[in-house]
Image (spheres, rainbow, N blue to C red):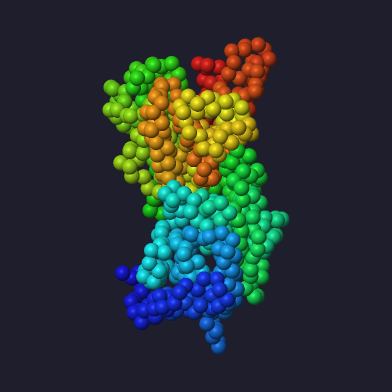
């Protein structure tokens, strides 16, 4: 089956398949590259003969060789100037792959940007024993036809994964974990997309994997030296920002670039480079588009946005709804502790629970009015007698009760499984903004829709002011009580007093990115309670593991997180849990503490317009801050 616009080209296709199968793969010998170049030209002939959109050998890829025209027009001149690579790029990639193969066996090669399949061909021939997986949007008219041809020639050694790499690569990482020995990046042409690919492929890469990438401007740029505009050029010169992504990643310590190669006449404009991913434990700051990326010594990547006064718009054809999720789960509840969604103030009565929902709807109504976007609060509850629907007094905000009969985990950890079931029924669009929040002590200060539109590929999780020993000691205690099998990375994270701690009270993002996180959250929580929990027994009233999971996932996947105080706009300081102060949260009513509390309130009031949520708002137990 061929993509629209392409026709079967049996003769050229047969010539390519025959050439591949009649001789052993090229490998890394003396004449290996000559053999690869011959096959690449046959692959181009197969594309040109069936797909008019494919104009010349290696078009736009590393083998690119525009035809020489006696009297070229403006477009032909531009193609000749920008895309005449000769053997420079392909030969460099082949040589670097062979060096890696000589030092350590290459079993799996991964690339983003399939185009017409020429780089996939290069890898398949260079390492005859390796498998090649290509990730591609499939938006080129000839892509599907060329992929089918490579599959026919190389069989199960080759596969292509269609779709946006922002979604397909993280999903692949969850399924296959670390398998890529060589990675080649030549996908989306923007800073944000290329940086996302850099991070996402790190989660698919084996230790010491070879990282290769295209569209490098200068060596100083990709090694992270100097001002990025001075080193990399203007946005247009930097290939829409892709070179900026390499510059930022190098400055952050994410990658170390060892060498690059440029075609003749394109020095400082368009080259290919070889690099390695650095250790995950890095500490640095670098600029990333609209925000700063701060990587703590604990290994968590968190964003500090730059405030953008321009309201982002919803993509064409999307609804961009805001779906808020919360829970009122009371089965077996003893009302002796705070569980994140139901606390001692509600006492398990319908009237108290209704007041709790209405209070949140009041905040939600005030926050959503400026955005004019559709907001709905879905309350997952097992409390009998709750009204099916509630509205704020002004009628702007609505809560829908989602009644459940039973669940098989402790209440606080069951909510994630229930949220996932609910969202499968609601069928959010990729741009819908999903947030799960604690009901009893979270307040909406602004509509989160702007955050989701401004950061459509970024996970958002609350952080608090107690990011040192206090939180670490608490998490270590819960880890022990629940028999949580902490990974070495998470254990190191707990031992780092400076690491940023994330909280389960507020988390979300655009559905395209939050879906992957929620699936992983449910899988890890379920696995713990249905295996380890049953083996050792558990106290479902007093302990939960969601706080460990919510920190461990970003640590292991290295997915950057847009968070709250002090690194971002998501949540304000946890006033009731402020650390290392003699007065906040204490019952000290001395003049000194009264002055301190007044100053603290004034500071929070000044910060109010810059945050989207507040959490744990009481300065003194029972006394609300707002």
Answer with left or right where residue 92 lies relative to residue 370. right
In this rendering, the answer to whether 251 lies above or below 332 is: below
Q: State the residue in front, 597 or 435.
A: 435
Q: Is residue 96 above or below residue 440?
A: below
Can residue 298 be spotted in the picture?
Answer: yes
Tell whether 612 sits left or right of 220: left
The outermost residue toward the right is 226
Farthest bottom residue in view = 70
For image coordinates 49% across by 40% down, the residue present is 553
Picture quarter containing residue 421?
Answer: top left
Total marks shown come to 0
The answer to which image quadrant residue 499 occupies is top right
Residue 372 shows in this picture: no
Dividing the image into 4 quarters, which one contains the N terminus?
Answer: bottom left
Question: x%, y% of residue 442?
Answer: 48, 28
Q: Position of residue 363 (x, y in %)?
A: 45, 29
- Identified at 69% across, 60% down, the residue is 220
- On the image, the x and y values in percent for residue 514 come to 44, 43
Q: What is the x, y in percent for residue 155?
A: 38, 67
The correct choice, above or below, for 132 with respect to 597 in the image is below
Residue drawn at point x = 52 percent, y = 24 percent: 477
């Amino acid at each position: 089956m061929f993509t629209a616009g392409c026709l079967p080209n049996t003769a050229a296709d047969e010539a390519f398949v025959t050439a591949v199968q009649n001789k052993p793969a090229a490998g890394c010998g003396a004449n290996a590259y000559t053999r690869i170049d011959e096959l690449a030209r046959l692959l181009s002939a197969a594309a040109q003969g069936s797909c008019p959109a494919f104009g010349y050998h290696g078009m736009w890829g590393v083998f690119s060789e525009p035809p020489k025209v006696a009297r070229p027009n403006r477009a032909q001149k531009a193609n000749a100037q920008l895309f005449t690579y000769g053997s420079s790029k392909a030969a460099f990639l082949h040589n670097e792959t062979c060096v890696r193969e000589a030092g350590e066996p290459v079993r799996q090669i991964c690339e983003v940007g399939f185009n017409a399949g020429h780089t996939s061909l290069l890898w398949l021939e260079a390492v005859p024993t390796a498998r090649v997986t290509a990730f591609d949007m499939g938006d080129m008219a000839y892509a599907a036809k060329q992929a089918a041809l490579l599959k026919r020639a190389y069989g199960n050694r080759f596969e292509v994964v269609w779709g946006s790499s922002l979604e397909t690569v993280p999903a692949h990482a969850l399924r296959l974990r670390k398998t890529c020995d060589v990675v080649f990046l030549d996908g989306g042409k923007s800073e944000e997309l290329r940086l996302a690919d850099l991070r996402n492929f790190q989660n698919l890469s084996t230790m010491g994997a070879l990282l290769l990438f295209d569209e490098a401007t200068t060596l100083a740029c990709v090694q992270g030296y100097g001002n990025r505009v001075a080193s990399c050029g203007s946005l247009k010169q930097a290939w829409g920002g892709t070179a900026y992504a390499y510059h930022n990643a190098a400055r952050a310590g994410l990658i170390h670039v060892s060498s690059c190669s440029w075609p003749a006449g394109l020095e400082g404009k368009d080259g290919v480079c070889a690099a390695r991913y650095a250790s995950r434990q890095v500490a640095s700051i670098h600029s990333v588009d609209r925000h700063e990326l701060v990587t703590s010594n604990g290994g968590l990547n968190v964003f500090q946005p730059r405030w953008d006064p321009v309201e982002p718009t919803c993509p064409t054809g999307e609804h961009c709804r805001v779906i808020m999720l919360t829970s009122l789960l009371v089965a077996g509840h003893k009302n002796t502790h705070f569980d994140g969604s139901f606390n001692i103030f509600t006492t398990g009565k319908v009237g108290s629970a209704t007041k709790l929902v209405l209070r949140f709807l009041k905040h939600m109504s005030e926050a959503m009015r400026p955005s004019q976007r559709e907001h709905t609060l879905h309350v997952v509850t097992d409390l009998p007698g709750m009204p099916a629907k509630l509205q704020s007094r002004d009628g702007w905000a609505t809560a829908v009760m989602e009644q459940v009969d039973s669940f098989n985990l402790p209440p606080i950890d069951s909510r994630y499984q229930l949220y996932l079931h609910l969202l499968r029924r609601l069928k959010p669009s990729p741009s819908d903004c999903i947030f799960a929040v604690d009901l009893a002590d979270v307040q909406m200060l602004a509509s989160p829709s702007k955050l989701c539109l401004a950061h459509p590929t970024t996970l958002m999780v609350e952080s608090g002011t107690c990011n040192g020993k206090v939180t670490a000691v608490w998490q270590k205690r819960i880890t022990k009580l629940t028999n949580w099998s902490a990974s070495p990375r998470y254990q190191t994270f707990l031992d780092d007093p400076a690491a940023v701690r994330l909280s389960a009270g507020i988390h979300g993002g655009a559905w395209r990115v939050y879906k992957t996180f929620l699936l992983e959250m449910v899988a890890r929580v379920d696995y713990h309670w249905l295996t380890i929990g049953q083996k050792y027994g558990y106290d479902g009233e007093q302990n939960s593991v969601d706080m460990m999971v919510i920190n461990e996932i970003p640590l292991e996947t290295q997915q950057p997180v847009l968070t709250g105080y002090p690194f971002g706009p998501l949540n304000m300081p946890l006033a009731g849990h402020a650390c290392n102060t003699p007065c906040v949260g204490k019952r000290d009513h001395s003049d000194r503490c009264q002055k301190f509390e007044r100053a603290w309130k004034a500071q929070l009031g000044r910060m109010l317009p810059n945050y989207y949520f507040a959490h744990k708002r009481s300065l003194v137990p029972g006394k609300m801050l707002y």
